[in-house]
Image: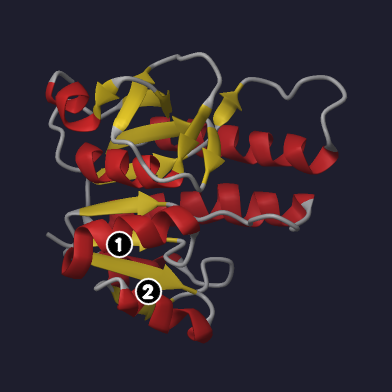
Amino acid sequence: MRIIIAGGHGQIALRLERLLGAAAVGLVRNPAHQADVEETGAQAVLCDLEKAGVEEVAGIVRGADAVVFAAGAGPGSGAARKDTVDRAASVLMADAAERAGVRTFVQISSMGAGKPPKPGSDEVWAAYIAAKTAAEDDLRRRDLDWTILRPGRLTDEPGTGLVRLAPEVPPGPVPRDDVAAVVAALLQAPGAGRRTFELVSGDTPIVDLLATE
């Protein structure tokens, strides 16, 4: 397999790359991050999704089995970068996947997307949720085998392999380890296409849960 991971130096992406090893290709915009990606066993490719054109990205994606959008503007970024990374970069990756003929696309979104931000929400948080919602809406309009994953509150606790995954679940935490493991499983799950899942910690083993999807 060959899996292209946008946001290849992100915390979930690095965990996913360790799981996928040589099958993973992590896109990074900072040359200093290449070594961290390569240490996972994945290939690192320089590509700044805020500056790249669709032809450049399609050239990287062509021949892959799937695309995973794990990019995000990250803590400390303002509202403007929530749009250019969390929305526009996702649109770019989906455009590139279509142009390259890669049908499987897993988008890591966020619990809370799909609904207006609560009144009084922080401006940057509201921009983040708006960007994630717009990225989801764009993906659903495409003729791709997309899967949207909305994790709950992310933690750095060790993964347990036990989750709750459904179209809608109560808010809660989930270790980044388990998010990465679920993404890896979704890439293999034949029934996951064109579906939206929310994800928190639970009591169902990831392998057992996805075997029923």
Q: Residues within 10 Å of mark 1 (few under 14, many from 20)?
A: many
Find numbered disc 2 in the image and state the secondary structure of the residue it sits on: helix
Residue position marked by numbered label 2 in the rendering: 37
Does residue 169 appear anywhere in the picture? Answer: yes
Measuring from the top left, give residue 136's x and y in whole percent: 49, 34
Amino acid type for the residue under numbered disc 1: Glu
Name the foreground residue: 128 vs 163.
163
Foreground residue, 94 or 109?
109
Instruction: Please provide percent x and percent y for residue 184.
Output: 24, 46
Residue at x-position 29% and y-position 68%: 25
State the image coordinates of residue 2 (x, y, percent, origin top left): 17, 62
Q: Are marks 1 and 2 in contact (CB under 8 Å)?
A: yes
Picture layout, residue 40 above or below residue 108:
below
Residue sitting at x 24%, y 31%? 206
Q: Residue, x 21% and y 22% (percent of image)?
A: 209
In this rendering, the answer to whether 54 lies above or below 75 is below
Within the image, what quadrant is residue 63 found in?
bottom left
Q: Earlier in the sequence, mark 1 or mark 2?
A: 1
Residue 202 image point, x, y percent: 37, 21
Is residue 79 found left or right of 101 in the rendered image? right
Foreground of the two, 42 or 1: 42
**Quarter the C terminus occupies:** top left
Q: Which mark is residue 193?
A: none
Q: Which residue is mark 1?
A: 17
Residue 122 is left or right of residue 72, and the answer is: right
User: Visible in this render: residue 141?
Assistant: no
Mark 2 surroundings: few (<14), some (14-19) or many (≥20) residues within 10 A? many
Three-letter code for the amino acid on which mark 2 is drawn: Val
